[in-house]
Image (cartoon, rainbow, N blue to C red):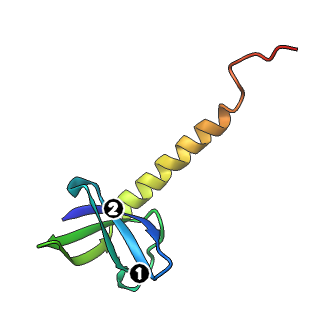
């Protein structure tokens, strides 16, 4: 099983899945994804001979990564004040 990230949907009804461990992406029909799929969802893929055999949502990793991104955004927003003083 390979971990994949739903990067984006294209205008022609395709979904782009990024598989970092293989250093490649896959373009699949958006309707072949599980129902709850959205940009930012993580999947477990079964890949054989360069073809995706099965796609399952990895709920644990999706939730973990969303939480991590949210924490980072909160940290960035709390540090909005510049460390440099302005000269009058």
The quarter of the picture where residue 82 lies is: top right
* Disc 2 element: strand
Numbered label attached to residue 30: 1
In-image side of 29 versus 84 (left or right)? left
Furthest residue in direction front, as rendered? 12
The quarter of the picture where residue 5 lies is: bottom left
Residue found 30% across the figure and 73% down from its top? 56
In-image side of 34 versus 19 (left or right)? right
How far, Cα to Cα, is label 1 from label 2? 14 Å
Q: Position of residue 13 (x, y in %)?
A: 45, 82
| Residue identifier under label 2 | 18
Q: Residues within 10 Å of mark 1 (few under 14, many from 20)?
A: some
The image shows residue 56, relative to residue 63, as above or below, that is below
The quarter of the picture where residue 19 lies is: bottom left
Q: Position of residue 38 (x, y in %)?
A: 48, 71
* Disc 1 element: helix
């Amino acid at each position: 099983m390979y971990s994949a990230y739903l990067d984006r949907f294209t205008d022609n009804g395709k979904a782009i899945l990024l598989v970092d461990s293989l250093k490649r992406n896959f373009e699949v029909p958006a309707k072949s994804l599980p129902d709850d799929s959205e940009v930012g969802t993580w999947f477990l893929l079964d890949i054989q001979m360069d073809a995706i055999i099965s796609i399952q949502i990895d709920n644990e990793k999706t939730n973990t990564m969303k939480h991590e991104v949210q924490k980072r955004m909160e940290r960035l927003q709390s540090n909005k004040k510049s460390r440099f003083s302005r000269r009058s």
